[in-house]
Image (cartoon, grey):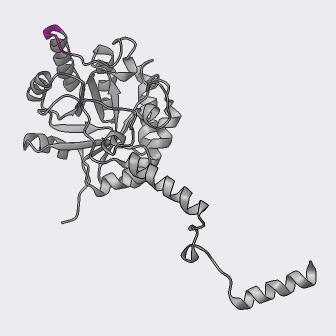
Amino acid sequence: MDRQKVTIKRLKEKKDRKEKITMLSAYDYPMGMAMDEAQIDMVCVGDSVATVMLGHPNTIRISLEEMLHHSKAVTSSCKFALTIGDMPFGSYNESKEQAIHNANRFLKEGGVDTVILEGGGEFVADVTASLVKAGIPVMTVLGVNPQMMHLQSGLNVRGSTAEEAFTILKEGLLMEKAGAFALELLFIPEQLAKIITERVSIPTIGLGSGRFCDGQLLITYDLLGLRQWFTAKFAKRYANLSEDIKNALNSYREDVKNKQFPQEDNVFTMSDREYDNLEKLIKSKL
């Protein structure tokens, strides 16, 4: 049977069937294509590109134009996964009008299917409701919000106390009421994630939030072992491509130094006749 495009409706059906949902981050065309071929359900063009690929100290510094650039690359290759554009800091926190304008750009220029916003308070709920009313599907982030790291005093686990956990639970219910199609639960205790997942009718996708979410998210560069300088309790490394890349580069250097690359299979040649004609031209004209 032909594979069908992942939709918000299909994600909700997966939750209802208790079938787990897969989500990964992507920042370029080849990675998006690989995820589509692997039948990943949701592909997020995350603002984590700021720290993972661009070397910024946090995600706050990534611009809207940079996010659109990466979104275009990913959506050019993702034909089946539901694609999500991560709206960067400063692109939606001024007004509902600003949020709608920039979310429109994500869908029209970036080619994504949906957008994601950070935060679970009243302001983000109002923005979410306005976007949904404007025909733009929204996923929201609860728990740790990297764009609000200065307000939250870093990227530490949130919801460890009963009072804070209850606040996050109420935010989840508020986002569902505002019309969000899914919740990303970021760095919260497993028990809290379980309660939220059971209390809301929309899918929950966990990053560092335990086993009971409807789906799981990882930063792809962590999954592939491409960030050797970064280790985290929540991440699982499925490959060690950083080491493979290092070995490949060393082999290339040695082959060039030892005249083992390029070899005959790697070069283009002229026919003997044209080579003779070239020699004649050189002798007669140079």
Q: Is 244 above or below relative to 44?
A: below
Residue 148 position within the rendered picture, expressed as x and y whole percent measured from the top left:
37, 17
- For the question of whether residue 19 can be seen, the reply is yes
The residue closer to the viewer here, 256 or 72, is: 256
Residue 160 part of the magenta segment: yes
Position of residue 131 in the picture relative to residue 7 (left or right): right
Q: Quadrant of the N terminus?
A: bottom left
The span picked out in magenta is: 159-163
Residue 238 position within the rendered picture, expressed as x and y whole percent measured from the top left:
26, 46
Q: Is 221 above or below relative to 89?
A: below
Q: Residue at x 10, y 23 (%)?
A: 191
Residue 200 position within the rendered picture, expressed as x and y whole percent measured from the top left:
12, 28
Q: In which quarter of the image is residue 157?
A: top left
Q: Residue at x 65, y 80 (%)?
A: 269
- For the question of whether residue 29 can be seen, the reply is no
Residue lying farthest to the right in this orientation: 285
Q: Which residue is drawn at 39% across and 38% down?
A: 227
